Amino acid sequence: MDEVLEGKLDREFQMQAERLRNYVLNSELESTMGGHKVNGQMLARMVETCVSSMCKGQRIILENLRDIVLCEKPTVELDKVTAVKGVKTASQTKMERIVPLTKPSAGSAMYDMQEPMCLIENSASGELRVNQEAVNILSEISQPVVVVAVVGLYRTGKSYLMNKLAGKLR
């Protein structure tokens, strides 16, 4: 991917990127609807489910995806998180389940993420694929995690923004 020198970027964009970086770094712990803390295992299940659904051309119903993620079972039922027309029917409405989350033991060390990870990548054929190494790392994290997604058109500063958020300047 081409690199862009910081001096060639619009000053307003640089200031916005810095504000976003500060916001993300100073954010309090986030949780899903219902107050469930988001941890690595939940995020790994969500990423795998979303990528699988997108590769099959299915739309994702976020409310149902949340239910699957909160479920402790490793198997994912894609028909519960996707819909052909993207319309949620009455039969698809879910009741919120309360699932206890694992709390880190007093002796367990906090995981220190040294650099950002790419969870979803494009394969050589242009298909989306899950980065299994990143999923494995996330699956081992039982403490809350923060995820940042940057989406945009070609040559709009996505890499610059992610590097800025990670505190890396080129």
Image (cartoon, helix red, strand yellow):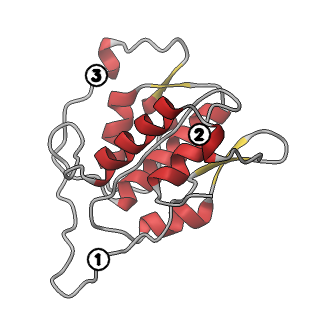
Disc 2 residue crowd, few under 14, some 14–19, many 20+, Cα 10 Å: some
Left/right placement of residue 53 relative to residue 71 reads right
Mark 2 — residue?
158
| Relative to 96, residue 4 above or below | below
Q: Is residue 39 left or right of residue 12?
A: left
- Disc 3, SS: loop
For image coordinates 40% across by 44% down, the residue present is 18
Q: Splitting the image into 4 quarters, where does residue 91 fall? A: top left
Q: Residues within 10 Å of mark 3 (few under 14, many from 20)?
A: few
| First in residue order: circle 3 vs circle 2 | 3
Q: Residue at x 28, y 52 (%)?
A: 38
Residue 80, horizontal then vertical, whole percent: 43, 31
Q: What mark, if any, has residue 93 been given in the picture?
A: 3
Instruction: Tell me whether the residue at label 3 lies in contact with that at label 2, contact meaning CB atoms closer than 8 angstroms.
Output: no
The numbered mark at residue 110 is 1
Instruction: Give me the C-alpha separation between circle 1 and circle 3.
Output: 37 Å
Q: Nearer the viewer, mark 3 or mark 2?
A: 2
Question: Looking at the picture, how far across and down is residue 144, in whole percent?
Answer: 27, 60
Q: Nearer the viewer, residue 124 or 97?
A: 124
Identity of the residue drawn at 59% across and 67% down: 133
Classify 153 as above or below 100: above
